[in-house]
Every structure is written in C-alpha cells, then in structure tokens.
Image (cartoon, rainbow, N blue to C red):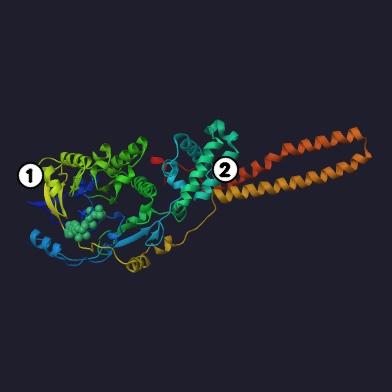
Amino acid sequence: MYTPDNGKIWLATGSERVYLDPAMANRHGLIAGATGTGKTVTLKVVAESFSEMGVPVFIADIKGDVSGMCVPGCENKHIRRSIDTMGIENFDYTSFPVRFFDVYGRLGHPVRTTISEMGPDLLGRLLNLTDVQNGVLRIVFRIADDQGLLLLDLKDLRSMLQYVADNAGEYKIKYGNVTPQSVGAIQRALLTLEDEGGDIFFGEPALDISDWFDWAQDGRAVMNILECCELFQHPLLYSTFLLWMLTELYELLPEAGDLDKPKIAFFFDEAHLLFKDAPRALIEKVEQVVRLIRSKGVSVWFITQNPMDIPESVLAQIGNRIQHALRAYTPNEQKAIRAAARSFRVNAAFDTEAVLQELATGEALVSVLDEKGVPGVVQRANILPPKSSMSAVEPAVIGTVIANSPLCAKYANAVDRESAFEILTAAAEEAQKQAQAEAEAREREKQRAAEEKQKAAEKKAKEQAKAKKKTGSSRRASPVEKAAASAMSSIGREVGRQLVRGFFGTLKK
Ligand SMILES: Nc1ncnc2c1ncn2[C@@H]1O[C@H](COP(=O)(O)OP(=O)(O)OP(=O)(O)O)[C@@H](O)[C@H]1O
Ligand SMILES: [Mg+2]
C-alpha cells in the first residue's frame, strides 16, 4: 500500500515526496501532457490509491489500456529503477477489483439509459438542435412528464413527437407553440443519431449508478471501467454520455460537506471533447456541475493533452494538477506552454516553462492543495509506478471478469416494457378501429336511409341523409382523443407520479 500512515496518497517523488491529500481530492484534478508522456499511467496510480483507500472509481478507457488493471503488472527496467530510486518498500504487483462496462455490450456490462432519464438538455446537445428546436423538445418532454408517459427509447420519443405534433393546437396555450417544421427537424436529427448507432444506449435496464459503489472482500473499492474505444469514435456521443453520468452522480449523492476522502473519483479521459464546439450555456452548466459536485464528495479528474482545451472557468475549479511534458512546435503550442507554466506557483529551484518541455516519460510537474486548500509550490517529480498491468488485456480476460461479476445477470438482457410508443400506438390502433367501426355504421345507416328514401318524398329523404352525415363527422375526432387520453391516464397510473426533472434536466430519482 502506498498510503503511508499520514493518510495521504504518495503520488510522486522529486527532491522530496509529493502527497495528495484525499480530503482535498474533491477539489478535483487535472492530468495533462503530450501523447505518450504518461497520463494514463498516472491516472492508474491515482486510481489504484483511491481503490486501496476504499474509494470507488469510474474510468473512461479510450485506448483499452486501462483494462490491464484487472491483472498484476510485471517487472520492467523502468519500474525497477523507480522502485529502487524512490525507496518504495514492499512493492507488490497486483490486480484490482474491476467491473467492465461497455455501451455496445461487447467488452462490459451493457450500459443503457432512457430518454426520460437523459432529459431534453443533454439530448438536445446530442441531436445538435437549434435553440428553437430545443424549446420544442422541452415542451414534448414536459407533456410526456406531466402525463407520466415514459420515454424509454428513440421510438418512444418519435411517437411522442408525432403525437404532440398531431395535437399541437390543443397544447398550444398551456405549453407553447410546436411547429411541424421543428418536429420535422428533430425527427431528422433522430434519424442521424440512429445512423450513428446512437440508438444503442437508449433502453432498459438503465444503468444504476449506485452499482458503482461496491467493495471487494479485502476492503478495496471497485474500479468501474467504461470501455470507450468504439464510443470514442463518436465524440459527441462520448462526451454527452459521460456528462450524463456525472449529472446522475450529482442527483444520486446527498450533500456531504467536508470529508476526509471522496466518496467516488471520476476520471474523464480526453476531457477536451466535452467543451469542443459546446455552446456557452453548456459550458456554464458543466462549470456549475463541477463546482456543485464537490460538496457531494465527488473527485473529478480531467485528462487531456493540452490544458488550454479546458475553459478557464472549469480550470479554475481544479486544485490538483499533474502536468506531464508539453511539446512546442507551433506558436499555439508555445502559448499553451506559457499558460500551463503560469498556472503553477513558482518554484525558485527551476524555470517552470523550460522544465515543462524537457520532462521525461512518467515525470511531471505536480502541484497539489495543502490541508488549508492552498496550492503547493510546483514540484518536478517522477510518478510512482502502477501495481497493475500497464497494457491492455485480451478480450477473453475481460470476458471472464464480466462472467464473474455480480452485475452480469442484472444488465445482460435488454427489456422493452410498455412505454410511450406502445401506449400511443395502441391508442392510435384503438382510434383507428373505432373510426372504422363508425365508418361501417355510417355505411349501414346510409343504406337504410337509401331504402327509406325510396319510400319517402325525395326532398325529405335528402334532408335526412344530410343530417346523419353531419352527426357522423362531428363524432369522428372524439374516439381518437378518448383512446389517447385513456391510454395516457392508464400509463399515468402505472408510473404513479409525474416525472420531476432536476439539474441539467435529467430525471430526479
Ligand atoms: N509512472 C510510470 N512508471 C513507469 N512507466 C511509465 C510511467 N508513466 C509512463 N510510463 C511508460 O510510458 C508509456 C506511455 O505512457 P501512457 O500510456 O500513460 O501515456 P499517455 O500520455 O497516456 O499517452 P496517450 O496520450 O497516447 O494516451 C507507458 O506504456 C509506460 O511504458
Ligand atoms: Mg493515454
């Protein structure tokens, strides 16, 4: 165990040892550096220490190399040298309790969520909607929420959109205007999302974030690894999904105040994607969630190549920084180096800007918060070696971990319970049946009228036929509405409550 008796996490060694104070971990962390400089290994070292302290972690694994944490590491020259020069006693190569998750269900428990749970704000971002279209989407969610209609998957959302569009006149006064153009645009965006495979993660059983909080028998906390190799091919899907998880954590956890260690650590790899092309309002929301989640005991770690890719307002929330080497080939890169150097408290022993460019692999500039929350003077230090394997494991190994996981049965099979699509389809079918029955009745009536017509005077017979036709048409619309309304109230009873939305428009539990 790296954690010495002072209860802190031994992170790196330079002219002296550098410790991360777990009580300050909820002031978040940044691991930055050019490609191949050691970011993922640093992430592993921090995550291993959290697990050993009983703090569960969540890690997005983009290259598959985090998966190695389920097997012990093995000796190499670099690690041997670190162990000797840093004076690490009793270093043991060991595996960690790992759970694998995968949106595509191949290299982990399938991760799904429902449209209702994701909410209109995040979905609007995913669909790349304009402000007006976002407004319409919000109205559609409001109507579904108010009626207790569940939107589980994309086909539910499609039927709900269609239903609201068909009955736009009725909802206009209470909810606002829903134009066919906006609904059409949203439907088209849904098609694009489907084409990109985005429909795969909408459905049930939805991921229950509380499953992340689990411990092995030896007291070490589980590491929840989300395999993202494929998800990462769709950056918008990837970043929205991770943001959704963060907001779910926010909704799940109660206020915790100051803790001696975080309740969970969340590692967000390639974090710059969250902010790429993001509208101002979204950046503000992210800044807000990062700030607020602190008092719930969540430690968020952003991993990115260039710290300048993260907005200043978010960067300002990050107290603990591990900066690996940066390269300066272009004027922009030189600017990034100056900015990164300026973000540290100067150490009189060296020139931060110069050292940033000459750091070796596994070496970093480190600054952590002291117990008063003040950033320490920057240290040049070598990050400790990880105890688990630094490389990716074979899919077969992951398969064994999945098969032995207690979550296997819970998430293995998708279910499709009754929701908006089924209800509205049934309502429409019922309405169609009724309309057909009515049409048949009218036809019979017409025939009878025709027979009577022969008996009665020609003028009188004409008037009769006209009157019957009129009563028929005024009745036509009502069964459709009645069927839809009764279906709505029946699902309303099934759900048993109005759906309430919290921060970010995600569903309140
Ligand atoms: N602390 C360390 N101890 C021992 N070896 C290390 C350490 N850090 C990095 N290395 C070595 O450097 C290699 C590259 O590190 P790593 O994969 O963490 O880089 P990265 O910054 O995540 O790269 P990328 O941006 O490509 O993901 C590792 O495979 C390992 O061999
Ligand atoms: Mg990496």
Count of number-bearing discs: 2
SS class, disc 2: helix
The residue nearer to you, when weighing 212 against 136, is 136
Q: CA distance from mark 1 to mark 2?
A: 65 Å
Q: Which residue carries the number 2 mark? A: 162
Residue pictured at 17% horizontal, 44% vertical: 369
Name the kind of residue labelled 2 in the image.
Gln
Q: Report the residue that reaches farthest toward the left.
A: 349
Going from the N terminus, do you reach mark 1 or mark 2 first?
A: 2
Name the kind of residue labelled 1 in the image.
Phe
The residue nearer to you, when weighing 7 against 15, is 15
The image quarter containing residue 50 is bottom left
Q: Report the residue that reaches farthest toward the front.
A: 330
Count neighbours of disc 2 (C-alpha within 10 A) and say few if under 14, some if 14 to 19, many if 20 or more.
some
For label 1, being within 8 Å of ligand 1 is answered: no
Camera-side mark, 1 or 2: 1
The location of residue 276, given as percent across then percent down, is 33, 42
The location of residue 431, given as percent across then percent down, is 67, 46
Residue 481 in sight: yes
Residue 53 in sight: no
Residue pictured at 15% horizontal, 62% vertical: 79
The location of residue 349, given as percent across then percent down, is 5, 44
Q: Which residue carries the number 1 mark? A: 350
Residue pictured at 26% horizontal, 43% vertical: 257
The location of residue 212, given as percent across then percent down, is 33, 56
Question: In this picture, is 90 found above or below 383?
Answer: below
For label 2, being within 8 Å of ligand 2 is answered: no
Question: In this picture, is 473 found above or below 394?
Answer: above
The image quarter containing residue 58 is bottom left
Image side of residue 135 versus residue 68, left or right: right
Image side of residue 315 versus residue 179, left or right: left
SS class, disc 1: loop
